[in-house]
Amino acid sequence: MASEAFHAIVDYLRSNLELDAPDRSPEELRAAMQGDTSLLPPLPGVTVDERTIGGVTGLWHRPDGAARADDTVVLYLHGGGYVIGSPDTHRNLTTRLALALGAAVFSADYRLAPEHPHPAASDDAVAAYTGLLDAGFAPDHIAIAGDSAGGGLTIATLMLLRDRGVPLPVAAVPISPWTDLSLSGDTMRTLADVDPMVSEAGLRRMAEWFLAGTDARDPIASPLFADPQGLPPLFVMVGECETLLDDSRGFADRAQQAGVDCRLEVYPEMIHVFPAFAGITPEGDAGVDDIAEFLRKHLAL
């Protein structure tokens, strides 16, 4: 049974989210997301600095006093439909992840559409990862994680690294990943009245801005249609009440059939990117703990 705090978040989202409003510009949507996330207070115990890695700026999170924060890092790719969001809007989640892991987290400020359409985001994610390698981080001390569009971008980054012969990170965590920009999943419609955050109309606008005429089934834009063979261990986590539920289930099924060590966890009653509500709901706290547990195992923390 979901907590009262979680139900309060759902009620708030139903009353305040307008991502599918057809008259709102990208700038207005970005400002609205920034305003919502700015309500969360900074978390003590983690030092956050702006850095540039591989030519990509972002926020570097280092847990105070953590011995492994100098040699182990998670590259984090924020969500927002490739149009909104930033390392700052996701600072609550990334700070808590760094603290739970006792390792560094680099949250990349990749370029957004419509100003920078596909493949700008994946180009930046690859550049940030190779920048970490150039900075001396060993592949088995690097993981990648991301939520929503950043979850799809996490998978796309792995595929590009694999295809280019770059040593892969030790593991990855796509959180509520958007893997199908053609929006073909049945849950896009069957769960439309249940999901308080993500609608088909809102995603369609963002996909159009991001794709800029590219085929929605391009495997780098939509990893659901890619060959996942050879990817590192994955933990795909998704809420039971998401329109994007089929994006996770469909990709995880393909990955498992391709022989990838892919764990899919569907969380009862949960909504899109529920770990983002860590510090507000016990479900969010548990989600961050699950991510950290999976990554600690593979990063040998």
Image (spheres, rainbow, N blue to C red):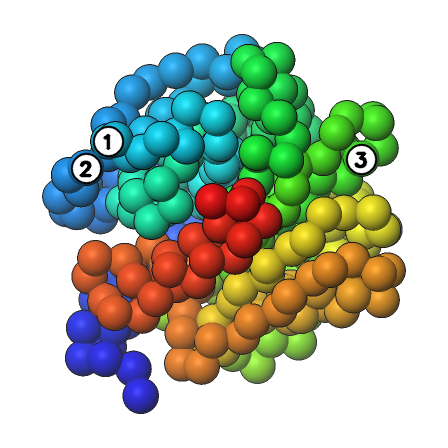
Q: Residue at x 57, y 34 (%)?
A: 142
Q: Which mark is residue 64?
A: 1
- Closer to the N terminus: mark 3 or mark 1? 1
Which is more foreground, mark 3 or mark 2? 2
The amino acid marked with disc number 2 is Gly
Count of picture labels: 3
Query: Where residue 249 appears, x then y in whole percent?
Result: 67, 70
Vertical position of residue 40 compared to residue 167: above or below? below
- Closer to the N terminus: mark 2 or mark 1? 2
Dot 2 falls on a residue whose secondary structure is loop
**Residue under pointer 2:** 45
Question: What is the C-alpha distance between the residues marked 3 and 2?
Answer: 35 Å
Dot 1 falls on a residue whose secondary structure is loop
Q: Residue at x 40, y 81 (%)?
A: 269
Query: Where residue 266 appears, x then y in whole percent?
Result: 54, 75
Crowd rating for badge 2 (residues with CA inside 10 Å; few <14, some 14–19, many 20+):
some
Crowd rating for badge 3 (residues with CA inside 10 Å; few <14, some 14–19, many 20+):
some
**Residue under pointer 3:** 162
Q: In the visual, does 51 lie left or right of 134?
A: left
The amino acid marked with disc number 1 is Asp
Crowd rating for badge 1 (residues with CA inside 10 Å; few <14, some 14–19, many 20+):
some
Query: Where residue 244 appears, x then y in whole percent?
Result: 56, 65
Quarter of the picture containing the N terminus is bottom left
Query: Where residue 237 appears, x then y in whole percent?
Result: 53, 64
